[in-house]
Amino acid sequence: MEPLSSFFAVSVILLGIGIYGLTTKRNAIRILFSVELIYNAANLNIIAFARLRNPPIVTGQVLVLFTIALAAMEAAVGLSIIILISRLNAEIDLSKLSKLKG
Amino acid sequence: MTDLLFLAFAAVTIGAAILAIEARDLVYGAAALGIAFLGVAGLFFLLDAAYVGWFQIAVYIGAVVVLILFTVMLVGPKMGETPLGLKRVSLLAAILVSLLLGMTGALANATAFPGQDSCGSGCDLYLLSTSLLKNYGVQLEFMSLVMAAAVIGALVLSKTDRGQ
C-alpha cells in the first residue's frame, strides 16, 4: 500500500491543474472542466483523510457521495446556462460576456 | 503490485487532466476528462472505497461527460477559444499555489496526522450504507430535494419560448 501522502500529492497536482485551467482559459466549457477537476481533487483528499482515523469511520465516504451528487447537479445547471449563453450571444467566451453587468 | 497500480492510476489521472485542459478540440478534451475521472475512480478503489469508485464511474462518466458532450455538440466545438495574454503569469501562479498547498499538506501530514492507514476491514459497504441511512438520512433527503430543484432550474433555464 502506498503511503497516504502520495494520494495527497496527486490531489494537489489535480488542484493545480484545475487552478491553471481556471486562470488561463476563457471558454465556459473548459472552465467547467477545471471546476470538475478541482471537485475530484477535493474528493480524493477527503477519501484519503477518512482513512486516518482509528477506529475507522466512513463519514468521509458519505461526504464524497454527497459531493459527487452536488457536482453532477452543478454540471447540469452550468451546462444549461452555457446553452442559454450560446443562444443569446454568438460565443461563449467568458471575458466578452457583459449581458449581466449592472 | 499496488505500487504499480497507484503509479499507473496517478499517471493516467494527471496526464488526462492536463490533456482535458490543453486539448485543441473540446470533444477530445471531454474524452480526456472522462479518462481522468476513471483514474480518480481507480485511486478510490486503491483506497478501499469501492462503492464510491463505482458511484464516481456511474455519475461522472455516465452522466457528466455525456452531458458535456451533448452541450459541445449543441454549442459547437469551435466557439470561444480566444487565447489570453497572461498565460505564463497564470502558469507561474498555479505552480506557486500548488507548491504552497503541497507544503501545507506535507506539514500537516508530518505533525498533526501521525497515524497511517487505519482502515483495514472497516471500509465496507455495510458500514457505509448503515451510516448513510441511519446517521445521514435527513441530509440524504435534503440532497434529493436540492437535486429536484437543480433539475427543475436547468429545465427552466434551457426552455425555449416557441409559443410567443
Image (spheres, helix red, strand yellow):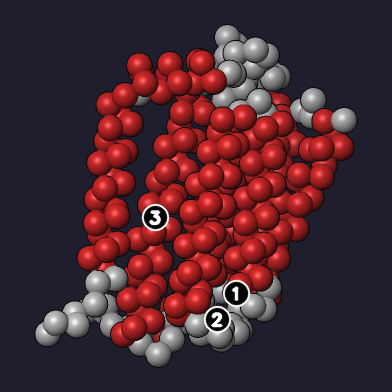
Residue B49 drawn at (x, y percent): 61, 28
Q: Which mark is residue A74?
A: 3
Check the picture and name the quadrant holding the C terminus of chain B: bottom left
- Residue sitting at 79 percent across and 50 percent down? B11
Residue A88 drawn at (x, y percent): 31, 85
Helix, strand, or loop for circle 1? Answer: helix
Chain for numbered disc 2: B
Helix, strand, or loop for circle 3? Answer: helix
Residue labelled with disc 2: B77
Chain for numbered disc 1: B
Position above or below: A36 against A45: below
Q: Is residue B40 left or right of residue B7?
A: left
Residue B48 drawn at (x, y percent): 66, 25
- Residue sitting at 53 percent across and 45 percent down? B58
Label 2 – label 1 distance at C-alpha: 6 Å
Choose top left, top right, bottom left or bottom right for residue B123.
top right
The tag earlier along the polypeptide, 2 or 1, is 1
Residue B41 drawn at (x, y percent): 64, 41
Residue labelled with disc 1: B26
